[in-house]
Amino acid sequence: MKPTLSRIIFAAILAFIALHFYGQRVIVAEEFALGTENARKVESRDGKEFTASYVKNMASIIEGIVNHSSVSAPDPQYLLWLGNSQLHAINQFRQGDHIAPYWLRESLACSDCIVPLGFSLPNANFQEYLAISQYVQANVPVRAVVMELAYVQMREDALRGDFTPIMTQELQGRIGSTKIGREIISRWEQSGDKKSSQRFSGLEGFIQKRYEEKLNSTLESNWPLWANRSSLYVNFLGDLYNLRNTVFFIKPSTVRKGIKSRSERNMAALEAILADCRRKEIPVIVYIAPVRQDHPIPYDAKEYDDWKKEVAAASARHSALFLNLEQLVPPQYWGSRDGETLDFMHFQGEGHKLVAKALLPKVNELLGKCQCGPKGGI
Amino acid sequence: MLFNTVSYLLFLSLSVLAYWLMPAVYRRWLILGASLFFYASWRIEFVFLVCFSAFVDYWFSLKIYDAKHPVKRKLFLASSLSINIGLLLYFKYTYFILNNIEAAGGLIGRDWKLAVGNIILPLGISFYTFLSISYTIDVYRRLFDPTRNFGVYLTYVLFWPHMIAGPILRAHELIPQIERTHHFNADHMAEGLRKILLGLFVKVALADQLSPLVDDAFSIAPSKLGGLDVWTMAFSFGFQIYFDFAGYSLIAIGSARLLGIHFPENFDWPYLAVSPRDFWKRWHITLSSWIRDYLYLPLGMQRFRDSSEGGINVDADRAGKRLRLTVALLLAWFIMGLWHGANWKFAFWGLWHACLILAYRICKDRFLFISGAWRSVAGWCITLPLVMLGWLPFRADSLDHSLQYMARVLDISSYGGVGFRESFYLLAFMIMAGMLVTRNFLKIYENAVIPAWMKYAGETALFGVIIFVDFIFLRPVNQFIYFQF
């Protein structure tokens, strides 16, 4: 059948009507990733944030510290607390709930003497921990490091595109001081993720880039549907993701097998952090992240056990304190992602208190008690 | 100018509108002006280079045509080819040549390092050089009388839909279309729009979404990967480059169609090829046809075909002829490999395909006992993985990495584990399955007796989905892969 213009015109009309209605269902990428039952929490004191779950916000916090605008105490000790979304998300958030770094800070004898910088990224891997720890140490005196380790993080790989703004030559040099660091940087250089974070990266070096940016900006200002494209993109990818899960029966409880080469890279990055901290005499606490215990965990049992042993051994090698908190949070403090599917990663506000309470004596032991009097808190 | 941008769509719309509104006598100038603007959207200074190169070929072609003495004709041809190839060698192969000289010196303990300044590779130089070469040779062969209008010739070289990355058209296929007055035809407009929409879909929704996964996979050291990982990478990159280049070609063909100009198809479901020779009748058809007529057959001292269609499709019947054609094949593919990039890994890729074709020639008559349909299936099962493996050197960082990837494929013990998320393997499988289903569906659809209204509604809905997806995914995150050639 010969193509006709009318078909294209009707197709375009149908498409734009569909886009209009599709765009009204707004999915925030982050909410989609966390699930509707989980809320991201950012903590602050005196209007100054000390936790972050985006790289750009970590950079803002660090900048504030460097400019002496972040805390009121003259010589605060910074504790760098690295984690994934378990550190910054609260399941079934209620007024008065806070995340673990907040409770730790509140419970410490002097809330401004020891500042836990809770830096976490969704699905963070240990290679990103290495990058963040080097970034923070380059700018701020870090007195101790705490790392939350979840087995599912071993399946993640490489640095995400969000790291672009902080990846200066200096930082790349710091990260690249170890073999795994060099591998991370080398892959970063070739990374498609880095490219896709730059909107017009395909036009680098083209004169066209200038007027393409102008055109896009004009369209965004004058055409709401065009301005809504990033939301449409998130919607679409989210729907594809759900379709994939439906077609292949993938659920949060589906057992995730280890990916050997990724695991090796992540463990090498962990060793690099531990070795670096040991060399600089920065005490480290490493803890196995709490996992809900009332359902079979979504990991291969043997792989998971072997991994915990490996982490314990690495901690011992580098004189880091190892804690296994996997059973810390009781079943009643867990929930679901979206009202239906189980959430194995994110617990309720009470769970965060428990984590802070478990770490408090160890942190006090490592950093020493402040001169100020004892405080309440957890 | 990248095709997958808002500015290109605006440029195209304005050009097409102006073209049909303007009196026919000015249309050629509009195309020329638009093409110059199109190329200048990359870097304005290289417009002068391409115009200079075009003028040189235009001038020499007239000299070839007017010369009576065969020696003089040959001399003019040689001069034109030397300048074209010289420019290509300078811009594209200087670093490659110098690096190899340095490496050779290193082998004998000499320091032969030579410093040159920063040489920027002009966009599309490989393609417009081939265009120019084919024009000059066609004039020499007396297949085509050269145009005596430099504006026409410049338009032929610079015509924006095909200038950067093909399809590579012969002068006798394009110049008459440039000179002819076209009449507005709504069906041609519809056809052009269809191809552009489909091309954008294939580029932005398929190729560009595969790109970060493929880039990430190839950033891992080969020694850390297993055999299954390497196969998946080979297939995934094979799909990426196909969608990328086919997408580009569709947009180019569609853009030309909006102006009433016909371009031949450049791809014909290459991953359904049942033999290596069949693959080269389906992949980058205009390039393989060019190689056939200007390299392969002349090197093999055979009669050329004079068409940008058909691909490489030549058999030899006599032993002497066979040997000559074999040498010609290896040489032509070696050159074609290097044409793709100044690196030995591209030469390896070229020779890989030459060896596949040679192996096919040797083996094909031994399997005639297998019935036609099964022979096709068997041929596809053998051809597809070998073609996909051939993409590894194309994408790998170096020849060394390419060989390491191949070694992983041959290492049976490496097939135990996985190096990527499960979805990466699944995606490669689903794309292949999707391609098979789509092709078979289209075949059935073409022959099925379906009420016209149903076909109309179905195609409208399909293009509605394509436009929907194009709108969401249109962003110039990646260039077209073939732009680097």
Image (spheres, helix red, strand yellow):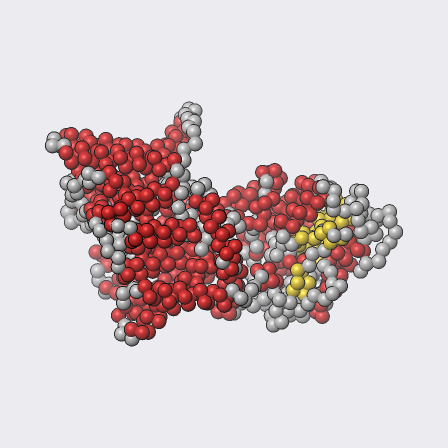
Q: Residue at x 40, y 43 (%)?
A: B41
Is B231 on the left-hand or right-hand side of A265?
left
Q: Residue at x 79, y 55 (%)?
A: A106
At which x and y percent is residue A255? 57, 65
- Determine the image quadrant of residue A136: top right
Residue at the right extreme, as displayed: A373
- Determine the image quadrant of residue A293: bottom right
Q: So how many labels did they put on this image?
A: 0
At which x and y percent is residue B426? 46, 61
Q: Residue at x 33, y 68 (%)?
A: B441
Residue at the top extreme, as displayed: B110
Please say if B155 is above or below A262.
above
At which x and y percent is residue A296? 63, 68
Q: Residue at x 52, y 43 (%)?
A: A189
Q: Nearer the viewer, residue A35 or A325?
A: A35
Is A190 on the left-hand or right-hand side of A323?
left
Instruction: Tell me the quadrant of the picture where the C terminus of chain B can be found.
Output: top left
Please say if B93 is above or below B456.
above
Q: Is residue B299 visible?
A: no
Is B185 on the left-hand or right-hand side of A115?
left
Please say if A46 is above or below A95.
above
Q: Is residue B94 visible?
A: yes
At which x and y percent is residue A3? 29, 64
